[in-house]
Amino acid sequence: MNKVMDTLLSHRSIRVYADKAVEGEILDQIMKAVQAAPNWVNLQHVSVVAVKDKERREKMSELCGGQKHIAQAPVFLVFCADFYRTWLACQAKGQTLDETVSQVDNLIVGANEVGIALGTAVATAESFGLGTVPIGDIRLHGLEVIQELNLPKYVLPLLGLCIGYPAENPGIKPRLPREAVYFEEQYNQDLGPLLAQYDGIYSHYLKERPWNSRVGNWTQLAADFYQLPYNHYPEVPEMLHRQGFFSGNQVQVPTNNEKERRRD
């Protein structure tokens, strides 16, 4: 097995970090790798905002549901789908972008590229001995994140990433059986036995970690997570609307009263 595979197969989420700064040279290498990652038509629809300031990291922690590791990690990267540069290019050529960027496929493109970029950043950071944990809750209060980071129209904060030197070793989570994920020629829809097998493995993993708040098994976790009412990120529709990705007739923007209730 080569060093790349060693790094990839050793991944685990780190939520406790040592009081040690991440070297600027390593951050430069992470960004070089992110920029070298595959992207659509070389349009490069990703931007990254590095949050190092302690007070701003604490603010990001608050906006992401009070996740303490965001404030503790010396660097918090915010990965954005970015069509602002595309808008500038269109402006320079006398073209409009509003009607084009609001097509749903462009949102898919931006989300795809952010996912590729974040995965690349994780692999690169961990190859230098750093720990990471992705943060989806950057979308929880996305409108305030946009304001805090001075993001222009056509830029969406989609994922965050804590980076720092690990101060814990939580172990590696067992993944689904390969046969439930990888198929040849056609999808195998008869996954019940494989999921039952994985439930046993996952349940044992959780029981061995008494500090873990999750109990049960994987199918229970999945069912609980997606039970109704499902509305984990209520500000996303308005964020998409304000940033130019959905037109007015595509999304219902919440009222001020609704937003206040959700904020509380």
Image (tube, rainbow, N blue to C red):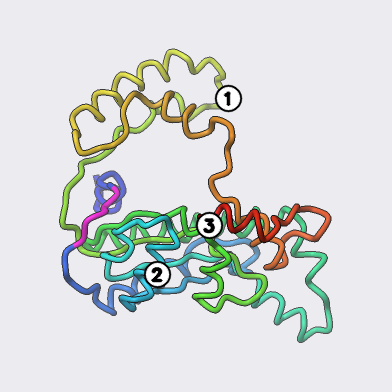
Instruction: Say whether disc 3 or disc 1 marks the residue closer to the N-terminus.
Output: 1
Circle 1: residue type: Tyr
Residue at image position (45%, 25%) is: 180
User: Does residue 161 show up magenta in the picture?
Assistant: no
Identity of the residue furthest to the bottom in this view: 92
Question: For mark 3, does the 10 Å Cα neighbourhood hold few (<14), some (14 to 19), or many (20 or more) residues?
Answer: few
Q: Secondary structure at mark 1?
A: loop
Residue 120 vs 26, above or below: the answer is above
**Residue nearest the viewer, comparing 49 with 209:** 209
The majority secondary structure of the magenta stretch comes to loop
Instruction: Say whether disc 2 or disc 1 marks the residue closer to the N-terminus.
Output: 2
Residue 63: percent from left, percent from top: 45, 62
Question: Nearer the viewer's eye, disc 3 or disc 1?
Answer: 3
Residue at image position (29%, 24%) is: 203
User: Does residue 16 show up magenta in the picture?
Assistant: yes
Question: Distance from label 2 to label 1 (Cα)?
Answer: 44 Å
Q: Which residues are magenta?
A: 13-17
Which quadrant holds residue 62? bottom left
Question: Nearer the viewer's eye, disc 2 or disc 3?
Answer: 3
Which quadrant holds residue 70? bottom left
Residue at image position (53%, 68%) is: 144
Question: For mark 2, does the 10 Å Cα neighbourhood hold few (<14), some (14 to 19), or many (20 or more) residues?
Answer: some
Residue 167: percent from left, percent from top: 16, 57
Residue at image position (64%, 53%) is: 258
What residue did someone put label 3 on?
A: 263
Tell me if 10 is positioned left or right of 107 in this view: left
The image's mark for residue 187 is 1
Asked whether the residues under the numbered discs 2 and 1 touch, taking CB atoms below 8 Å apart as contact, a structural biologist would say no
Question: For mark 1, does the 10 Å Cα neighbourhood hold few (<14), some (14 to 19), or many (20 or more) residues?
Answer: few
What residue did someone put label 2 on?
A: 59
Question: Distance from label 2 to label 3 (Cα)?
Answer: 15 Å
